[in-house]
Image: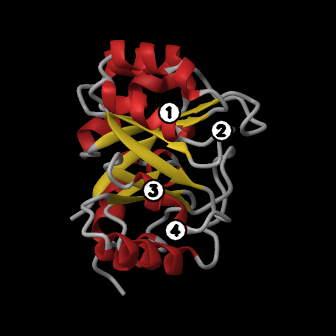
Amino acid sequence: MFELCASILAADFANLERDMRAANAAGVDAFHIDVMDGHFVPAISFGTGMVRTMERLTTKPLDVHLMVEKPLDFLPELEELGVKRVSVHYEIPGGPEAALRAICAAGMQAGLVLNPETPVESALPYLAQISQLLLMTVHPGRGGQVYLPGSNEKIAAAKSLLQGQGSNTVIQVDGGITPGTLPGAYAAGARSIVAGSAVFYGNIYQNVCALRSEKAKP
């Protein structure tokens, strides 16, 4: 089994409540929220105000992905809103150590994000602090991209590294997930799947059913 996180970056913002209710009914496990600051990545998506809106629209866990240079600035409000899980990038200025410690101190689950070019070994110093290792399978900052070649090999390498360390950290993947790419990611070791377009474009219920049914296929 895997956790399916619906990325609201791909939702219809003019009908956000409708799409949220449809995804809830379809049985997604959590909602993934990409917060972008226009500095760490060129794009600007939304800030903690969207997290506050999401908190009112669902009882499902909120999985917040901070694509920002200064994640510490966002954590007090995320804690106040009761967010369960917050992931920060390895590549942020000064490194992720302070942010990971602050997330854990606030009682939230910490995740570490690795960009496509960042080796999985970069996660080693932080394994004791994180519950989730998020591997970007596209370049961060824009939705609708194609799953990068070599992603499954990187997922498998991360799985091997975690097993070698006796770590229970869950591997999450984000980017380019479709019914065609999900089986390979799952087979390689991913157990938390972020999907945006594959959930929200078209019939949401049918999309979720298709993603669920594809897991075991070769």
Q: Residue under circle 1?
A: 98
Within 10 Å of disc 3 (Cα), the crowding (few <14, some 14-19, many 20+) is: few
Q: Residue under circle 2?
A: 94
Horizontal and vertical percent position of residue 141:
68, 44
Classify 200 as above or below 104: below
Horizontal and vertical percent position of residue 104:
33, 33
Q: Residue under circle 3?
A: 125
- The amino acid on which the numbered mark 3 sits, given as a three-letter code, is Pro
Q: Residue under circle 4?
A: 121
Q: Mark 4–mark 3 contact, CB under 8 Å?
A: no
- Counting residues from the start of the chain, the first of labels 3 and 2 encountered is 2
Q: Mark 3–mark 2 contact, CB under 8 Å?
A: no
SS class of the residue under badge 1? helix
Horizontal and vertical percent position of residue 179:
44, 68
Q: Which mark is residue 14?
A: none
- The amino acid on which the numbered mark 2 sits, given as a three-letter code, is Gly
Q: CA–CA distance between discs 4 and 2?
A: 18 Å
Classify 60 as above or below 56: below
Q: CA–CA distance between discs 1 and 2?
A: 9 Å
SS class of the residue under badge 3? helix
Classify 107 as above or below 218: above
- Counting residues from the start of the chain, the first of labels 4 and 2 encountered is 2
